Amino acid sequence: MRVAIYARVSTDKQAEKYGISSQLETLRKRNNEKGWTLVFDGGKDAFIDNGYSGADLDRPALNRLRRAVSEGRVDVVMAYDPDRLSRKLFHQMILADEFEKQGVKLEFVTQEMGTSPEDRMFFNMRGLISEYEREKIRERTMRGSRDKARQGKLVSAGSTPFGFKYNPDNATLEEDADTSRIVRLIFYTFANEDLSLRSLADKLNRLQMPTPKGGGRWRSSTLGFMLRNEAYIGRMYQFKKYHVEPKRRLKPLTKRKKSSVAMRPKEEWIPMDVPALVPLEMFEAVQKKLERNAVLAKRNTKREYLLSGLLHCSLCGGRMKGNAIHDVPYYRCYHRSDPEKYLAGPNNIYYPCSCPDIKTELMDNEVWDTIRRLIKDPDLLIHKLRQHNEGNSQTKEILEQELSICHNRLKSIPKERKRLVEGYRKGLYSDSIMREEMGIIDKEHGELETRINELEKQLSKRLLTRQHEDDIRKMADKIGTELDSIDFKGKQKLVRLLVEKITYNGQRIEIQTIIPLEEQLCPIHRR
């Protein structure tokens, strides 16, 4: 008799009663007692699916086993238990019928598998009962986890966000003194410096800041998830997602879990109180900047528009985009050209927006003239800076923290140089590698010194003296004299630095600036 041994362990190792090695040991012992001949799967004496769920029939080793059965190379299929073959009764019945049609006998260690109708009925009943018991266990486990979450406890310690630590005594999250400082530094740096997520990741990597998973490098995707995580303002939710059927079919040899994740309605989320690591105002400023960065990202456009991503229609709330008509550039409301996105009037009827187009030259000139007037008013800037700096101890703490990190990193560079030179003397590096690595170290040394000088200047100017105010006025005067000669890129950078949003309704332009003003700047569009 030619026997094919099949063993499987799922992706959830903790839920498995028997591992691969123990299954194979028992199956080989049974085969030796029978004196049967093993059918090999390539170079192995067994068909093994390691890390595949029993809820799916599409498994590599099982597919090869079924192919061997159909080719007539197998007389007996042996598995430790029916649920090793499949966790679903329906799939067990499919395989049993398929093997029976080929004259192949099924054999299990945990139960006898006869060929009579009574034996088949018992086999099916046992599979049905096992499936029912698994669903009951799963339902009880899920209910217990929900009750635990409603008591304000963390269900899974693996979901602990960076900056927190898990307290096993009461199953709650606490602030981690070491990593929470890094979280605050990340939020402050992104909110106050002109950086993209990728640039922020590069900066953290240069400073050799520890990553959430202990890896070597920060990535923009990791930072994007962190900066949007409401847990850092004390709003953490559990049971936000659930598993669904996969959206697209995976290849047979893919070892990923074959399910997709969907979001539950927000009213089903279970909140959990955690310490707030960053102020709400800073978190909101970061969200606005993330949204602005997404809108202002470079697109494949033939023209450049000064107000791209900043201009909105005040009639319908939609964005206005640059559009050329007969080679004349205009700003046009999105909902004017795509009425299906604009709902207006009774009976839920869609209408195009009535906001008229406006020439980009006219709009750009109005906005730029307003920005020039803002720059030429240094008294307002001094007043807002004084409000921002005085008494803001957290900002000072973050600046001091980054300064300490930069100094520590700067102290470690001579040791790196020394190790590099020693390795070169021992012949571990070639001349080209030596020059390249030394160039990287020298570049980082210069960047750190520059950043330390910037931080020291910021800390020294926490309180605005009369001299500082005079310097600000001189700087504003200098910028004012250069505004007439600034190029398009310089104008665009300055506008995006000072302007949060611009709205237009066909008659009136309203500019909402980053610096809060007593009154918004509202030039009138002269038609």
Image: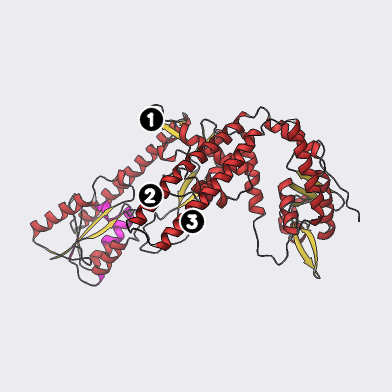
> Would residue 261 be seen by someone viewing this image from the given angle?
yes
Q: Which residue is mark 1?
A: 168
Q: Which residue is mark 3?
A: 439
For badge 1, the amino acid type reads: Pro
Mark 1 or mark 3: which comes first in sequence? 1
Mark 2 or mark 1: which comes first in sequence? 1
- Distance (Cα) linking label 3 and label 2: 15 Å
Badges 3 and 2: C-beta atoms under 8 Å apart?
Answer: no
**x, y percent for residue 515:** 74, 40
For badge 3, the amino acid type reads: Gly
Q: Which residue is mark 2?
A: 419
Task: Tell me the SS state at disc 2.
Answer: helix
115 left or right, relative to 518 = left
229 left or right, relative to 95 = right
Q: Dot 2 surroundings within 10 Å: few (below 14), some, or many (20 or more)?
A: few
Q: As rendered, which of 507 and 216 lies closer to the eye?
A: 216
Q: In the rendered structure, does residue 84 fall within the stretch colored magenta?
A: yes
